[in-house]
Image (cartoon, helix red, strand yellow):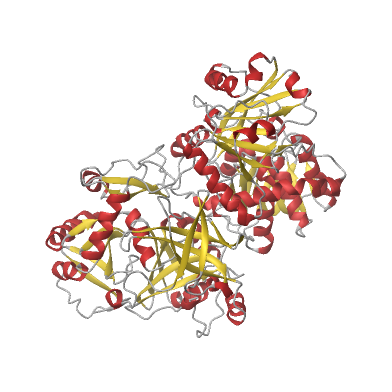
């Protein structure tokens, strides 16, 4: 066994072998995989082996498409069989909500190049003849769906990796992982110690335990999962061709042909977590005892959907554990707080996602960043300092139970909530707050304060029952003054003698003078957007940064990876809270609450002042696009600050407003949103953020070369705003843009402007088409809606109110 290696991959399932192969494919040959038993000894060997492209996140769907297409390449490269069965598949919809979801997914697939289609009941009968279509509205057909041989595929990855120079050590148990001062690792095994530059945790069922060796917690939990293989069924083996897959969300089941019979698996409601206190190290090629009781209702439903099952005998029952993250997506990437330690875990759909996970992680390790936005599977989307096993378990159970449920754009899942709250939680709850959550923190979506306003927002693909409450809050902001918390901003304190120099390198934009703030993108080396920041200069050695609260672990990791001498960084996201007030009466409210003269406080000014009894940091800026102030304070004093502002605000028509109103208000000014308009999928020049880049500053900021290149040669697409002739459903994101029957672009986000009474979308289209008045069609839930490109903001077009004195 080698004693040194560039990369040590721990875990020999399909994901570990995929990572190993992709590392060699991208040029690193000094890599090795360490497996405690044989390859496939965890969840891989007993997996059903199905694969499909359907995923609510478009980047995950694209990576699943990559994975599926990779298998033929593996076969050609290695000469081994993956046991591919490209039989296609249908996902059924038995009600309008499920059909809406399929329509939305089909629309996304149009610009992604995925050849899915919507089919009706008669077509379903022809495609999947064992299906009882009573009550079925339609289905999504995907020709790429299929299944494979889990063991053969894993060994094909392994052979391809070996062909690229990798080594694989089986029957070698990792006992410890210890980091050296230089950031490299000693991987201690029962056969000796391996010195590795990088460690990849692909431990599967044991990923939690492997992470604990490095002193970190990964939010993962195994769940018991059961599927059944039937005896021979004449209706199957007499078909003449292989029966396709059938996903039946109503029955929480998936079905496919297995030999001369069928295989059907369930995501049952009375599910059970497994190995709550840790996965036994001696578990491997075993199965769990059969448990028909927990799938009794699922089987009864399956008999109605697939009548041939009722008379079919059972050949075998496969009951084993699979590992899930709280939201069901993998945990991939550099683990925050550690150097050279990478996660490739929680990949419960290993044969749909394993290839894409391996590719993204290899790109991340070798090239420094991935080719697309991977936030949906980034291990940093869960804060290691925030998340706990007590949170993970109920969220994983919830995710398992909702595996085949409709995923609504406005749905707020209830498990493990409330988890983290601010001092305002009880006060706002008493005022009718209807809560959402971000990064485990409760965030008010809207306030049900009047008769008829719902205390629960019904999930929907159409305008929800929170529409009227949101409209009332928008009206208060635009015509009087609104107030909400600033707790859902990530906040960072940068101090030290080299703070300005460091910020000039990290941020692409101008770093402001003392007492001022600026807006700036943060770029990756390839010029991709990895942050949308407000930088406030409190002194020459003290700066406050604000950005997305939900991305704080992502941003913290980047700051720590790029830290310099003479700079101190602190994440103060939960140590500094407060409120924003916005609207035409905002200045009057603030002036009445402080003895500081604010008459000369300009747009983008920042000052320290006492508001009521509370020392505050006040910034004149607002994401609402209106006259507004962000007022930050110590959370211990936040309730006092609230009563000061609220009591004075009543004379000026103050109303609380939530995130639903905020996202409507920002549309009036065509403001972009993080992870919608601004994400690592896009560049500053594509999204209009280039206007905030300071090409004049004499600093080689990260991403400058790429930004300069786009400045010289503008990118092919451009972000634009459209007014949409919508009905009762607005753009959410990723709807295709059509011109003359051809898809030319896609929407990044949208919604309803309650101020203007118009449906608005933001979209990326070819730059040469970006002219005011351009007429297009946007596909929304299967309907083509006319839309017109607009360039003048719907509110305060000249900025007089936002910027004026």
Q: Nearer the viewer, residue 127 or 4?
A: 127
- Say if residue 90 shows up in the picture: yes
Residue 617: give x, y in percent of width and height. 27, 68
Q: Which residue is located at x 85 percent, y 48 percent?
A: 76
In the figure, 361 relative to 34: above or below? Answer: below
- Say if residue 582 shows up in the picture: no
Q: Which residue is located at x 55 percent, y 32 percent?
A: 136
Q: Which quarter of the figure has residue 124?
A: top right
Q: Nearer the viewer, residue 573 or 466?
A: 466
Looking at this view, name the residue that lies furthest to the right: 79
Residue 592: give x, y in percent of width and height. 13, 68
Query: Quadrant where the N terminus lies?
Result: top right
In the figure, 110 relative to 273: above or below? Answer: below
| Count of number-bearing discs | 0
In the figure, 177 relative to 684: above or below? Answer: above
In the rendered structure, the answer to whether residue 382 lies left or right of residue 112 reads left
Q: Nearer the viewer, residue 15 or 714?
A: 714
Query: Quadrant where the C terminus lies?
Result: bottom left
Residue 457: give x, y in percent of width and height. 34, 43
Residue 628: give x, y in percent of width and height. 27, 68
């Amino acid at each position: 066994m080698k004693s040194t290696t560039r990369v040590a991959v721990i875990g020999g399932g399909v994901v570990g072998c995929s990572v190993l192969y992709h590392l060699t494919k991208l040029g690193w040959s000094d890599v090795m995989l360490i497996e405690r038993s044989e390859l496939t000894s965890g969840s891989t060997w007993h997996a059903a082996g199905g694969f499909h492209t359907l995923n609510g996140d478009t980047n995950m769907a694209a990576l699943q498409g990559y994975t599926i297409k990779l298998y033929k390449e593996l076969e050609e490269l290695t000469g081994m069989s993956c046991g591919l069965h490209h039989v296609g598949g249908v996902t059924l919809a038995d009600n309008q909500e499920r059909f809406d979801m399929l329509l939305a997914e089909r629309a996304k697939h149009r610009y992604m190049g995925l050849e899915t289609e919507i089919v009706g009941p008669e077509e379903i009968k022809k495609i999947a003849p064992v299906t009882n279509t009573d009550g079925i509205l339609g289905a999504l057909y995907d020709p790429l769906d299929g299944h494979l041989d889990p063991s053969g595929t894993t060994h094909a990855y392994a052979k391809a990796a070996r062909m690229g120079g990798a080594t694989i050590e089986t029957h070698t148990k990792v006992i410890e992982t210890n980091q050296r001062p230089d950031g490299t690792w000693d991987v201690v095994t029962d056969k000796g110690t391996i010195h590795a530059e990088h460690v990849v945790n692909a431990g599967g069922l044991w990923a939690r335990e492997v992470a604990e060796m490095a002193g970190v917690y990964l939010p993962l939990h195994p769940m018991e999962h059961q599927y059944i293989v039937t005896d021979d069924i004449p209706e199957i083996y007499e078909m003449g061709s292989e029966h396709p897959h059938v996903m039946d969300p109503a029955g929480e089941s998936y079905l496919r042909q297995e030999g001369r019979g069928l295989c059907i698996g369930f995501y049952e409601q009375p599910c059970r977590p497994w190995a709550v206190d840790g996965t036994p190290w001696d578990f491997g090629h075993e199965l769990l005892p059969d448990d028909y009781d927990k799938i009794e209702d699922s089987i009864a439903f399956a008999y109605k959907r697939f009548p041939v099952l009722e008379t079919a005998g059972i050949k075998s029952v496969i009951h084993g554990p699979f590992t899930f993250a709280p939201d069901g997506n993998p945990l991939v990437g550099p683990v925050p707080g550690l150097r050279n330690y990478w996660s490739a875990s929680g990949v419960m759909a290993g044969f749909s996602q394993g290839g894409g996970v391996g590719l993204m992680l290899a790109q991340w390790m070798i090239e420094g960043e991935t080719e697309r936005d991977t936030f949906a599977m980034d291990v940093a989307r869960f804060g290691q300092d925030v998340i706990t096993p007590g949170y993970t378990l109920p969220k994983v159970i919830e995710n398992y139970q909702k595996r085949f449920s409709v995923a609504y754009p406005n749905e707020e899942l209830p498990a493990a909530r409330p988890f983290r709250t601010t001092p305002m939680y009880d006060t706002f709850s008493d005022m009718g707050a209807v809560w959402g959550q971000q990064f485990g923190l409760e965030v008010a979506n809207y306030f049900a304060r009047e008769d008829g306003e719902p205390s629960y927002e019904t999930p929907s693909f159409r305008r929800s029952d929170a529409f009227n409450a949101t409209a009332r809050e928008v009206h208060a902001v635009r015509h009087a003054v609104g107030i909400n918390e600033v707790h859902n901003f990530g906040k960072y304190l940068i101090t030290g003698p080299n703070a300005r120099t460091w910020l000039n390198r990290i941020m692409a934009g101008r770093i402001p003078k003392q007492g001022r703030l600026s807006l700036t993108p943060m770029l990756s080396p390839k010029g991709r957007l990895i942050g949308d920041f407000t930088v406030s200069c409190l002194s020459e050695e003290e700066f406050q940064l604000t950005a997305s609260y939900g991305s704080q672990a992502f941003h913290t990791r980047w700051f720590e990876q790029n830290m310099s001498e003479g700079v101190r960084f602190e994440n103060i996201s939960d140590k500094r809270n407060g409120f924003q007030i916005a609207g035409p009466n905002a200045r009057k409210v603030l002036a009445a609450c402080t003895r500081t003269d604010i008459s000369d406080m300009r747009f983008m000014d920042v000052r320290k002042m006492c508001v009521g009894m509370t020392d505050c940091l006040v910034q004149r800026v607002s994401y609402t696009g209106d006259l507004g102030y962000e007022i930050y304070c110590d959370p211990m004093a936040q309730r006092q600050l609230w009563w000061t502002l609220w009591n004075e605000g009543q004379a000026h028509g103050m109303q609380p407003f939530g995130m639903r109103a905020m996202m409507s208000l920002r549309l009036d000014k065509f403001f972009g949103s993080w992870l919608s308009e601004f994400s690592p999928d896009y560049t500053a020049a594509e999204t209009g953020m280039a206007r905030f880049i300071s090409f004049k500053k004499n600093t080689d900021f990260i991403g400058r070369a790429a930004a300069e290149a786009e400045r010289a040669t503008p990118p092919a697409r451009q972000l634009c705003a459209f007014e949409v002739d919508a009905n009762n459903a607005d753009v959410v994101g990723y709807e295709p843009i059509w011109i003359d029957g051809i898809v030319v672009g896609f929407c990044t986000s949208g919604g309803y402007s309650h101020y203007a009474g118009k449906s608005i979308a933001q979209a990326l289209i070819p730059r040469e088409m970006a002219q005011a008045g351009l007429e297009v069609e946007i596909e929304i839930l299967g309907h083509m809606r006319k839309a017109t490109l607009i360039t003048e903001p719907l509110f305060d077009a000249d900025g007089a109110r936002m910027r004026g004195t």
